Image (spheres, helix red, strand yellow):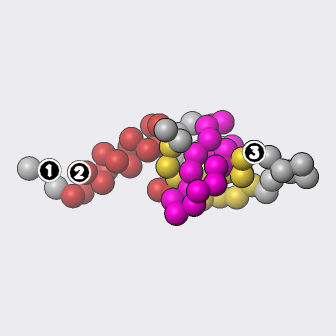
Amino acid sequence: MKTSKNVIEKLKKETENNIHQGDCVYLKNQDELFQVLGIDNAYEKCWVRKWPLNPNGSPVFEISIKQVSPNQ
C-alpha cells in the first residue's frame, strides 16, 4: 500500500523533472501562461515571467516549484 508521503514525493519529483528553463507553465489557480527563467531544485524555487512578453518587459518573480504546473 502506498502512503500519502510516497505519493506526494512522487508527484514532487515528477514536477521537478518535467519543468525546465525556457518552458511555458501555468501557476496554480491562474489561467495565464508564464515562462520559466531559472530553477533551483535545492530550494524548490523557480523564477518566472508572464508570457507572452509585454512590450515594456515582464517582471520576473520567484515562486515555489510546488505552485507550478507544466503546460501539457
Foreground label between 3 and 1: 3
Q: Amino acid at mark 2?
A: Asn
Q: Secondary structure at mark 1?
A: loop
Magenta region includes residue 58: no
Q: Position of residue 10 (x, y in %)?
A: 30, 45
- Evaluate if marks 3 and 2 touch, with contact meaning CB atoms under 8 Å apart: no
Q: Secondary structure at mark 3?
A: loop
Residue that protrudes farthest toward the front in the picture: 31
Q: Position of residue 38 (x, y in %)?
A: 65, 44
Residue that protrudes farthest toward the right in the picture: 56
Q: Label 1, on which residue?
A: 2
Residue 45 in view: no
How far apart are the alpha carbons under marks 3 and 1? 40 Å
Q: Label 3, on which residue?
A: 52
- Evaluate if marks 1 and 2 touch, with contact meaning CB atoms under 8 Å apart: yes
Residue stretch rendered in magenta on the structure? 21-37
Quadrant of the rendered image containing residue 45: bottom right
Q: Label 2, on which residue?
A: 6
Q: Tell which of 15 and 56 is nearer to you.
A: 56
Q: Amino acid at mark 1?
A: Lys
